[in-house]
Amino acid sequence: MAKEIWKPGNMLYPLPVVMVSLADRNGKNNIITIAWAGTVCTSPPMVSISVRPERYSYSILKETGEFVVNLTTRELVRAADYCGVKSGRDVDKFGELGLTPLQASGVSAPLIGESPVNIECRVKEIIPLGSHDLFLAQVEAVHADDRYMDENRRFCLEKAEPVVYSHGAYLACGEQLGTFGYSIRKKPGNGRKCKRT
């Protein structure tokens, strides 16, 4: 099996596509699409996002220290792309896209009502890295859309058809192939299944 050697680069794909919503000190809302986001700690629950300093949202994030991570679905993929290429300096993204800003429970940034999961975050540290600065944040609250709960009240995100990003392309997530630890279970196929509605 032949392998090509490439110069160092970011090849950790696919990535979650998230729309990060925020509000400036005057209450003006904005949305920035982020592909470089991730979970960094369980206890306390923490996430990170990486943002270029020249982005319009950067100064808002730095000033307020609050944001909401909104998961993206097949229904929201066009909005996610739009929010990644249009600047909040020039356009009201909530208004232009017909998205619903909902009040968060613990931060000033709004939730995106159409997103199946909204994660309220408060910045704990900003780490300059080079082209991007990393915003390390603690999770303050999570909102989950009850449309995606099964009969046992388990959350089934796959019913919302989440999307991922890889090398400039948005991809739909596929079928469930297993669940954590399935490789060592005695009975194969014990993974939970969520019914589609």
Image (cartoon, grey):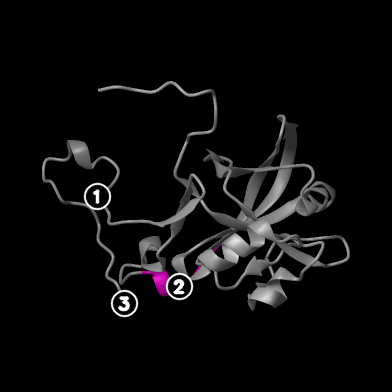
Magenta-drawn segment = 143-149
The answer to whether residue 111 is above or below residue 168 is below
Q: Secondary structure at mark 3?
A: loop
Residue where numbered disc 2 is placed? 146
Residue lying at the far right of the rendered structure: 26
CA neighbours of label 3 inside 10 A, class few (<14), some (14 to 19), many (20+): few
User: x%, y% of residue 23?
Assistant: 78, 62
Residue where numbered disc 1 is placed? 177
Among the two numbered marks 3 and 1 on one chain, the one whose residue lies closer to the N terminus: 1
Between the residue at mark 2 and the residue at mark 1, the CA separation in whole angstroms equals: 24 Å
For the question of whether residue 32 can be seen, the reply is: no
CA neighbours of label 2 inside 10 A, class few (<14), some (14 to 19), many (20+): few
Give left or right: position of 29 versus 10: right
Q: Are marks 3 and 2 in contact (CB under 8 Å)?
A: no
Q: Secondary structure at mark 1?
A: loop
**The C terminus, quarter of image:** bottom left
Q: Nearer the viewer, mark 2 or mark 1?
A: 1
Between the residue at mark 3 and the residue at mark 2, the CA separation in whole angstroms equals: 12 Å
Residue where numbered disc 3 is placed? 197
Q: Secondary structure at mark 2?
A: helix
User: x%, y% of residue 26?
Assistant: 88, 65
| Amino acid type shown at disc 3 | Thr
**The N terminus, quarter of image:** top left
| Amino acid type shown at disc 1 | Leu
Q: Nearer the viewer, residue 71 or 3?
A: 3
Residue located at (85% from left, 50% from top): 63
Among the two numbered marks 3 and 2 on one chain, the one whose residue lies closer to the N terminus: 2
User: x%, y% of residue 166?
Assistant: 46, 46
Q: Nearer the viewer, residue 49 or 88?
A: 88
